[in-house]
Amino acid sequence: MSQVRTAPTEARVTRPANPDVSVCIANWNCTDLLRRCLQSLFDQPQGVKFEVVIADNGSTDGAAEMVAAEFPQVVLIRNTDNRGFAKASNQAAALAKGRFLFFLNNDTLVPAGTLRQFFDLAEANPDVGMFGPRLRGADGLFQISYRRRPTLAALLHRVGLLRWTGLFRAAYYDYRRDTFDPTQVRSVEVLMGAAVFLSRAVFDASGRWDEDYGFGVEDIDLSTQVSRRGPLMFVSHVEIVHHGRAAGRANVHFAAPNVAIGYVHYFRKTGTNRCALFAYKALVTIDAPLQIGQKLLEAAWRYASGQRAKARKSVLAARGLWAFLRHELVRFWKA
């Protein structure tokens, strides 16, 4: 059997019959972070009736067992393998009963009253397609909480063969952070998938999460689809703590290749010229071994200079690139 839904007696008793909000979490390992996320939801008043539905992607660190034992009110889906974020999120949404859906990463902390704030915003602004909060890291610093849609020019700046020329620097910084203002309430192009709130009706009408994405870029795709039905709204007065990239860094061999493939799928889906896309694939392929060498040299220098944390990040980046070349290059070209 590919999946098992765990529904103990306690869950049937304590799960709200008609929740206002369904919190949907796709989980893969990260037991401790997931526990803290659920504690932040259940141990503080949220001001609305809500349920939590978790789709666990075959975690090997006991995450699913922890949820079943410590949070019996959670609706738990157990997948036997890693189906990716999009498929797991759609599984959770399919079992959710709420009129509103709150898709939430497992490495977040949700302050008291957050669900009420989103619920009130959605009720007062039915024309808005999707809401996203301000994200703050565990270090207290603001994280990029929204972006513009990516362009091929922006991603070409990340190719080492071209970065030194500076030809695409402006496009890259415009995409990544030049427009970010953490103090405003404003309409945006892309909301970060760490936490997004929308009605079930809009989610279904937008085609749900595109399951052709494995891990990464699916939030850009969903934002693009939802924006055709209503604006996306960044609300700076609703804030969530986001540790950021926890699952990706812990499983870089899976995450890094899927992000690269996800961008190609997004560009093809949105009508990028085939010749331009071919050129992009060729440049990324040629650049990958060069980037591996650069990251390893960078790691050696950082270790030698005592910057161990940064050195580990360089090694992780090299491992992700190696996994891309060794296991996913064919899928990258087919995307």
Image (spheres, rainbow, N blue to C red):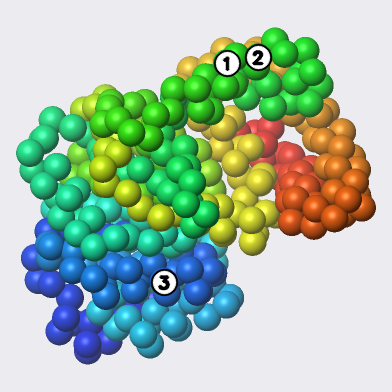
Neighbourhood count class around disc 3 (C-alpha, 10 Å): few under 14, some 14–19, many 20 upward = some
At 69% across and 27% down in the image, what residue appears? 158
> Helix, strand or loop at disc 3?
helix
As shown in the figure, which amino acid type bears the numbered disc 2? Phe
Vertical placement of residue 139 versus 67, above or below: above
Neighbourhood count class around disc 2 (C-alpha, 10 Å): few under 14, some 14–19, many 20 upward = some
**Count of residue discs:** 3
As shown in the figure, which amino acid type bears the numbered disc 1? Ala
> Helix, strand or loop at disc 2?
loop
- Give the camera-side residue of 334 and 57: 57
Quadrant including the C terminus: top right
Neighbourhood count class around disc 1 (C-alpha, 10 Å): few under 14, some 14–19, many 20 upward = some
As shown in the figure, which amino acid type bears the numbered disc 3? Arg
- Give the camera-side residue of 272 and 223: 223
At 77% across and 12% down in the image, what residue appears? 165
The circle drawn on residue 168 is 2
Q: Are marks 1 and 2 in contact (CB under 8 Å)?
A: yes
Question: Relative to residue 143, is residue 68 drawn left or right?
Answer: left
Rendered image quadrant of residue 265? top right
x and y percentages locating residue 264 in the rendered image? 59, 30
Q: What residue is shown with label 1?
A: 171
x and y percentages locating residue 301 in the rendered image? 90, 46
> Helix, strand or loop at disc 1?
helix
The circle drawn on residue 202 is none
Question: Relative to residue 284, is residue 66 drawn left or right?
Answer: left
Q: What residue is shown with label 3?
A: 36
